[in-house]
Amino acid sequence: MDSSRFFSYILAFFLLIPPVLCPAQNTALGNGIAERLLTETSLQRSVEFLADTVCGGRATATKGAVEASFWLARRFDRLALLPAASRRGPASYVRSFRVEGRTGHNVIGICPASSSSERYAIVAAHYDNLGILADRMYPGADSNASGVAMMLELARAFRSLSVLGLGPDQNILFVALDAKQISMAGAESLYSMITDGSLLDPRTMKPIRREQVSMMVNLDIVGSTLEPVTRGREEYLIMLSNDDALKRRLSEVNFNSRLNFDLSFDYYRSKDFTDMFLNRIGDQKVFVEKGIPTVLFTSGITMNTNKVEDTPANLDIPVLRKRTLLVFRWLDRVLR
């Protein structure tokens, strides 16, 4: 049975027999639905499309990047995410910005909380890459088609739970960021939209304000097992954050769910590299500087990063799926 048919059966069950469940039962049911929805096939297809020649390496303002942005908008629409509203025009998933004389495109979709909420968490992944240099295409499968694929599967799972009334207590902004390669300009544009009041919730037409943003989660290079933190343990994940409570929650979820990941809360045991990757490079830097609780999930830079060898064939899709499930369960807990 495919995931869409499974979801339809579950939805019919809820509509016909409204359940009365305790929070723990809701969580268990939500985890079961998410585990069925998150598939290796969907992750693989997303990575392969973004790394394909049709997207041409996804350098900002190129034809390939525009193709990728509109593909993402179509995916958001099929997932029934809400397009963010604007006072200057109709609601739209794609938001343009200017950087170094070029036009970048962020893609933004909102997953509503199951109950009324004025809190918003941001889950983001940049989709741009190096493009074509010296007639050679840089596919960017791990950097960062893998992060975008994870984000899309998280959006699928949380939107499904939201429809069923099992979603978290906060709204989630899913954002595919452009122009990470140009000084994190897409992340800067997103934050500017929040501070200048131009990013509106389409249900209320009220601006999403800075004080309503509970945290920012960045998914950047999450698909490889080529550089494990501990030799021989390929099921690993690196989480960098200045928030100790969020790190403790991940350890608890990892233990309770028996996923048994080798978790690391520093960048390969280096204080300097941990500081650099969390606070000075990457789209989360913009939000760290503004005092917003921020998390970076990564599987680390490899010998293929920023090379033509960064192809889908060099990713570990089964482990990417397990990482996606772990991040889902962690998010589901911290947003309740």
Image: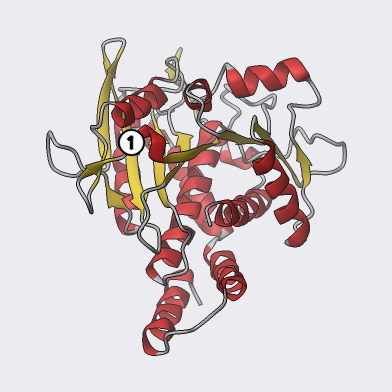
Q: Residue at x 38, y 28 (%)?
A: 178
Residue 62, horizontal then vertical, whole percent = 31, 23
- Given the current orientation, which residue lies at the most extreme right position? 231
Position of residue 69 relative to residue 43, above or below, is: above
Q: Nearer the viewer, residue 102 or 92?
A: 92
Res. 184 image quadrant: top left
- Given the current orientation, which residue lies at the most extreme left position? 89
Q: Nearer the viewer, residue 136 or 194?
A: 194
Circle 1 sits in a helix, a strand or a loop, which is it?
Answer: loop
Position of residue 215 relative to residue 164, above or below, is: above
Res. 200 image quadrant: top left
Name the image colouring.
secondary structure
Position of residue 273 relative to residue 85, above or below, is: above
Res. 141 image quadrant: top right
Q: Nearer the viewer, residue 133 or 181?
A: 181
Residue 162, horizontal then vertical, whole percent = 41, 64
- Given the current orientation, which residue lies at the most extreme front position? 211
Question: Local crowd at mark 1 within 10 Å, few (<14), some, or many (≥20)?
Answer: some
Q: Residue at x 23, y 54 (%)?
A: 203
Q: Is residue 51 visible?
A: no
Q: How many marks?
A: 1
Left or right of 234? Residue 290 is left
- Name the amino acid, label 1: Arg
Residue 24, horizontal then vertical, whole percent = 62, 71
Q: Is residue 66 visible?
A: yes
- Given the current orientation, which residue lies at the most extreme bottom position? 17
Q: Say which residue label 1 marks.
A: 209
Q: Nearer the viewer, residue 293 or 7?
A: 293
